[in-house]
Image (cartoon, rainbow, N blue to C red):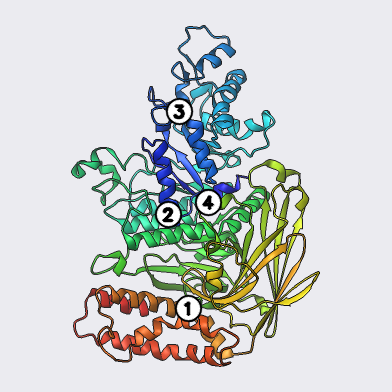
Amino acid sequence: MVPKYAMGVWWSRWYDLNNYDIKKVVDDYESRSIPLDVFVLDMDWHTKDDWSGFTFDEHLFPFPADSMEYLNQKGLFVTMNLHDNSGVNDWDALFPQLRDYLGLDPKAPKVDFNLVNATVAYAVEDIVLGDLIQNKHVSFWWIDWQQGGSQGGMTGEKQNPTMWLAHLRCTDRHRVGDDTRGMVLARWGGLGHHRYQVGFSGDVKELTWANLAYQPYFSATAANVLFPSWSHDIEGSPDDLEMFTRWLQVGAFSGTMRSHERGMSAGDCADKPEASPAAWGPNSGKCAVVEPWNTGPNFFEANRRALQWRARLVPYIYTAHRQLFDTGVGLMQPLYYHYPNHDAAYRMTASQNAQYFFGNSIMVAPITEPAAGDNGDPTQSLASKEVWMPPGVWFDALTGELSTVTTAHPHTIRSRGYTLAEVPMWFKGGAVVPYVPLRSMPSLTGVASQQNRFLGFRVIPGGVGSDATSGLAYEDDGTTTAYLTGAFVETHCNVTVEGERTEVSIATRGNLHMLKGFPAARAYQLQFPNALPPRNVTIRTSTGSEAVPFVRFGAVASSRQVPPRSQWYYSFEEDEGLVVVVDLVDIATAATVVVSLSTAADPQTTAALHGGLFGTLIRAVYAHANQDVDRTNPDENSPGPAYLSQLSSVGVALEKLADPMSPTHAFGALVAKVPALLANATQELQGIKKPNGRVVYTLALLQ
């Protein structure tokens, strides 16, 4: 298994970064609430005597161990680019020790790259790279350049340096008695290389939509040779920020999320846009963009949203990586793994129809083509996407719609328009998905590597018969090989529905005593999308039961912290939906906890919730905000009925009306008004005397 931190967000850039620059990058992520877990130093980290090098450039890092420890203190893990082919030369700091250990002539200028002489290969690992790992706080290596070929004494073809370097560096720590998991970021060494995750597909050649579309196809089909954990370059052209956003979204729902550019962010482009290399593709003309925030507010919000989805799903992603270790079936799965007898499961090609399973419970269909807007502004256009809906029950993460596709209609294709920030995504009905309660994290830096001291489970409606569903989160120490000897646990979340009563039990099973640093007690969060507000919530443990109180501003109480006590509240948020949230505080991990929710039957409101109510309300929020930009909301300067304003305020109003002390039918009564509000808001907008492109987009949102 790869370390848990590799599930998170990686950042790299080919820049001459120094000790202050790395602090600035971390602050850029941290201050903007963008998750970050792995800090990658491209090849400029070392001395500049050659393309290769194994010694920190002390012009940049006078105290390299101190700078790398700073990143470690922030919860980040460090990898650095290596080009082994040039060997270890006399300008490298530890060359004298290596030369003397190998008994070479004192005047020898270098130790050649050698993978067929174990003494030489291990000496480089122990003396040169060992110093960087043991004393300079480097976590693993990015093996670059020598792909295939016969360098290092290899015969070429099936015996090549890429495979052997990956093998050497993934197993070398075990040779010296270190139980830290070995990992490399390495180019493809051929079949069998799946043992040495994670794959680096090489520098992206052109910043084009075609190359963007190719990456999910590449990763999903690579799963067929047991290698779904690819790390692709994620960057964009400043002349097409829409493509950059869509590329980040693809990266967020892939094996490894790593921002990187191959030098296209500097050089001639900086001062001479017209001199930009043609290889960047037809949309380029300025330096490439790699920072998610360097895009303007609309694109930034969409970029951050994608990366936060990545961080939120780390427990789910890590559980899928355990499955990969056990079965060979990984995180990215072609649809035909689940539906082999349906022709439509094979419709994804290298250029279009990107659609795949992201783990066992989530189907993703990322946008890989530009929006077709008359005004050419992707923030004022919807991108159209056709998606095949396989047989089964599906929960639309963006609308809350719960739909069933029967085996009698296996060719269902659905088409919809998506905003810049939306990633088409469906959960299997009845799935229970583990997640990080991201809004409660004090910082999003280093979240992926942390023990789950606040663990969430999202209970998706639509289970078969609505009677029993379950899910689990796999957990171990995240960094060592102790899991091989049983040092891991599984936290199970089982859900039973009987009439208007839902019961959830959470239990952690396995060798808790073997897990170093595993919390003796922690908090849990349960989310119930599309659920009616419960009339009461109780919690039961071996010591007894108690009522869980409704807290109107429970989301505030749990903002950037674990709430001070157990609570429940109703929430309307774009990445969560209309959802009942239950926070359970200070629960012993060795115990079983049972949560019961009781509701009053309301078939009409339930039908509205399952029919896409959330999608209507969140699009109304977007529509209202869009018209506010140029002060053209229909009610902007008049005392009229203001239907769009009313509609856009319903979601938060439902948070208030979920209070058990509110009138019994108030929640349902407000929901019942939504269809009329939507129709009237649409008519209101259509009546604007001088409509512009903004109004056209707003109306499209409300469709």
- Proximity of marks 1 and 4: CB atoms separated by less than 8 Å: no
Residue 523: percent from left, percent from top: 65, 63
Q: Which mark is residue 31?
A: 2
Distance (Cα) linking label 3 and label 1: 53 Å
Which element is circle 4 on? loop
| Mark in the foreground, 3 or 1 | 3
Distance (Cα) linking label 4 and label 2: 18 Å
Check disc 4 and report the residue beneath it.
8
Establish if 2 lies above or below 342: above
Q: Quadrant of residue 53?
A: top left
Distance (Cα) linking label 3 and label 2: 28 Å
Query: What residue lies at 56% left-to-right and 83% top-to-bottom?
Result: 658
| Mark in the foreground, 4 or 3 | 3
- At label 4, the amino acid type is Gly
Query: What residue lies at 59% left-to-right and 64% top-to-bottom?
Result: 361
Residue 391 in view of the camera:
yes
**Callout 2 environment at 10 Å: few (<14), some (14 to 19), or many (20+)?**
few
- At label 3, the amino acid type is Phe
Query: What residue lies at 55% left-to-right and 29% top-to-bottom?
Result: 159
Establish if 302 lies above or below 94: below
In this view, the residue in front, 358 or 17, is 17
Mark found first going from the N terminus, 3 or 1: 3
Which element is circle 3 on? loop
Establish if 529 lies above or below 45: below
Residue 154: percent from left, percent from top: 53, 24
Residue 406 in view of the camera:
no
- Proximity of marks 3 and 2: CB atoms separated by less than 8 Å: no
Which element is circle 2 on? helix
Check disc 3 and report the residue beneath it.
56
| Mark in the foreground, 4 or 2 | 2
- At label 1, the amino acid type is Phe
Check disc 1 and report the residue beneath it.
614
